[in-house]
Image (spheres, rainbow, N blue to C red):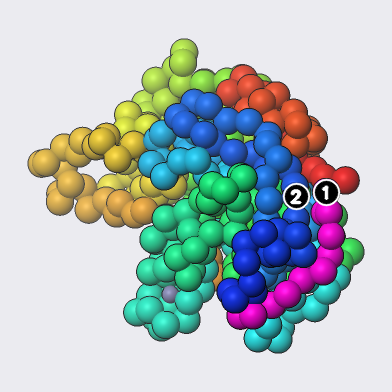
Amino acid sequence: MFASSTYVMLDSAESVSNSLIKEHNVKTMKAVVVNEIDSYATEEVTLDPPKAGELLIKMKATGVCHSDLSLINGTIPMPLPCVLGHEGAGIVEEVGEEVTQFEVGDHVVLSFVPFCGECDDCHNHRPNMCTAGAAANGKMLDGTTRVHRGDEDLDVMTYLGCMAEYVVCSSICAVKIDKSIPLDKAALVGCGVMTGVGAAINTAKVEPGSSVAVFGCGGIGLSIIQGARLAGAGQIIAIDLSDNKLEMASSFGATHVINGSTEDAVAMVHALTNGGADYAFEAIGVPAAMEQTYNAIRRKGTAVIVGVGKLTDSMALNALLVSISGKVLMGSMYGDGNPPVDFPKLLSLYQSGKLNLDDMVSTTYAIDDVHSAFEDMQNNVNARGVIVYD
Ligand SMILES: [Zn+2]
Ligand SMILES: [Zn+2]
């Protein structure tokens, strides 16, 4: 909840005492804070107003992504404490100085990789690989923080920290969208859908009539399945350990399902595809599944690793077969997407009924119920759980 709406621009605020800033500018809100590994809670924190080039956004929906869990359990190492959340959508409430492309009331989906426009990757049309995005050290682009708990500065996940009632972020992390699109559906485009559909279409460039195997049917895997369906794949084989997830996979376009807890998934993919899939995707982040993904493709096939494993883990490849099989092994980050271009494209596919986001949002939660959201994720209950705000 916002306590006040009177701001002083930060340029002048620098000369104002901290107590005065608090009195006049700082907002109080709820946010999900990871305090230490495996310990997180919804807490009351304060938020500074936007600086030049930044936006204040009232969050309407935040997807609960496996990468949030990976930050909680330490798989993705981050300085703590840190405000969670990187898949969100909301409404612009205030526009910082020098921001010209947004106005109050705009609906936006947040991108968790900034497009700095100045690094080699941005210049080479690879905004998903932006050097600034790769840094993601919990601070804003200027190295400072906007969220505080008492006198303590709090870091935020990937320049956002959008599992919170409000966010201040760089305007280059926001993409304006059509106001008629429900924001709980739109939020998913900010991570899972861009990552998954993009892995199939942008990274692998799945061809019509081809065979596709997808290891892992969480929000990313289900989005890969939708991407493969959109690309016209002939066979889409879903592999998971949960029958519930495999049922969802079928509803989103899988033509075959394999429960890897009872079946030899690689052998079954080879049998179903007469020698190996044209493309296989790993959407879990586990070395054994990455190896299965590579082993499931045919000679000259393409294996795409989308899942994020631990820094200390490695995958093994047979040293004889790597060259003579001619297989292609690719990593895919953020679906090799360009958010300002691809978010509206994905949402137009939703509006035309070709991309199913309605059934991706299985359950919505209040921010106070965040623990239920993560429990349900670990119990494979949801395609995607989404936190929504008043
Ligand atoms: Zn995510
Ligand atoms: Zn850049």
**Disc count in the image?**
2
Give the quadrant of ligand 2: bottom left
Majority secondary structure in the magenta region: loop
The image shows residue 92 at horizontal and vertical percentages of 78, 67
Q: Is residue 260 left or right of residue 197?
A: left
Q: Which residue is mark 2?
A: 28
* Residue interval drawn in magenta: 1-12
Most extreme residue toward the left is 320
Quadrant for residue 172, please give it.
bottom right
Residue 234 in view in this figure: no
The image shows residue 48 at horizontal and vertical percentages of 66, 61
Residue 18 in view in this figure: yes
The residue lying at 41 percent from left, 44 percent from top is 78
Q: Is residue 348 left or right of residue 259?
A: right
Q: Is residue 135 left or right of residue 313?
A: right
In depth, the one of 135 and 247 nearer the eye is 135
The vertical placement of 87 against 23, above or below, is above
The vertical placement of 102 against 111, above or below, is below
Q: Which residue is mark 1?
A: 1
